Image (tube, rainbow, N blue to C red):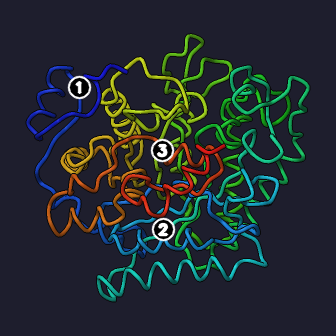
Amino acid sequence: MKEKDKFKFKSLKELEKKIDKLSLDIPISKNLDILKEKIKLGNRVIPNRLAVHPLEGTDANQDGSPGKLTIRRYKRFAAGGAGLIWLEAVAADEDGRANNKQLLIKENNLDSFKNLAVVMRDEAKNIYGDDFNPYLAVQLNHSGRYGVNNNILFHHELSDKSAGISPDQEVMTDAELEQVEDNFLRASKLVKKAGFDAVDIKACHRYLFSEALAAHTREGKYGGSYENRTRLLKNTIRKVKENVDIDIVVRLNVYDDIAYPYGWGTDEFGNMDLSEPKRLIEELEDLGVKIINITASTPYLKPYINRPYDNSSGLGMEPDETPIEGVERLIKLTKFVSETVDKCLVIGTGFSWLREYAPYTAAGVVEKSWADMIGFGRLALAYPDFAKSIIKNNSLDKSKVCVSCSKCAYLKAHNKASGCVVRDAEVYVPFLREIIKK
């Protein structure tokens, strides 16, 4: 990446000039009050339009229960004042776990998840009053090819290489995928018992449910046709809806940026083709999905698409675009989803790279009805009280924002507790040093 493409804006006006120069469709608004509005969702009221995205901390206990650093992170998020907190990827069963530091919900550690929900709600109420009740979602995941057993639905040379998959690795059977559906139903019941508001059937970043959407080359009832490729996701949603009284939400890859027949939402040349994603989004709304949290591509192949950055920390391809163009793409995808649904809430992503100017773009996006809420991931790690700053001060402190150095992702990639080495150095720099020493 050229030095001139990195974040160097000294004022909002400079950012606006860059947007105009590149003819980007990135709205700006100084009406930050719009982000402070409450949102009604069924019988719940979400306190504001700001959300914490799901970001894995790689700090669970061996049994999958939240570790000390897990509880610390979510307590800080709750104290930060966001209206919605989206709990990171929680494995629905042991086979779907990415590593032995990923959260895993099961009957014998259920009390630890109950405690986590109580800790978050109590922390928020202690600071903001009894009427402040953050909406809490749990993201259930099966890591698929990136899990402990490298479960795959089909072979794809680039994806196989990124996950260390051998050419003779057997693909999952249809019977095994049916079992995954039932495992997610069982886990969803536990999420409900733990006291959370919603369960996310995660379908993004080329983990199992996301990969299923691209299973054009797979045989059997989970591959080939559109109906077969969407079967795993839709069957699971139906089972949860019929058996668990809990909101269903989905973090969805709008497209993969992998050429057909190995990608979702793309043609054979790798160009974006959103005809199938549009159809699925409409069907998800018809199935009763309450919130769609948008994202794209995969951090294992093109991390800059789902998290525009200045520095990849050696984790992936250097982009052939400026980060601000990546921000625009995610905003356009958010707009696309919002224009496709009628009742479903849409959470936008990709704002962290904008640092202290992110609230103005967030407000602009919401003002245009391109999103109902705005989510922050890396910014939340660096600056857990970002929502409080926006709501109370109408600004973000530039000395606290994420600088898109990608070190949090670097820590996760090396199976170390993941957090901000810049703004939370005392806790996370020691983990970075452990990697460097090797």
Question: Can residue 108 be spotted in the picture?
Answer: yes
Please name whichever residue, 79 or 253, is drawn nearer the observer in this view of the structure: 79
Q: Image check: 126 left or right of 152?
A: left
Please name whichever residue, 376 or 415, is drawn nearer the observer in this view of the structure: 415
Quadrant of the frame with the N terminus: top left
**Disc 1 secondary structure class:** loop
At label 1, which amino acid type do we have? Answer: Leu
Q: Image check: 348 left or right of 252?
A: left
Mark 1 or mark 2, which is nearer the start of the sequence? Answer: 1
* Image vertical order of residue 383 relative to residue 260, above or below: below
At label 3, which amino acid type do we have? Answer: Lys
Quadrant of the frame with the C terminus: top right
For label 3, the crowd category at 10 Å Cα-Cα, with few meaning under 14, some 14 to 19 and many 20 or more, is many
Task: Say which residue label 3 marks.
Answer: 407
Q: What is the total number of numbered labels drawn onto the structure image?
A: 3
Task: Say which residue label 2 marks.
Answer: 73
Task: Say which residue label 1 marks.
Answer: 24
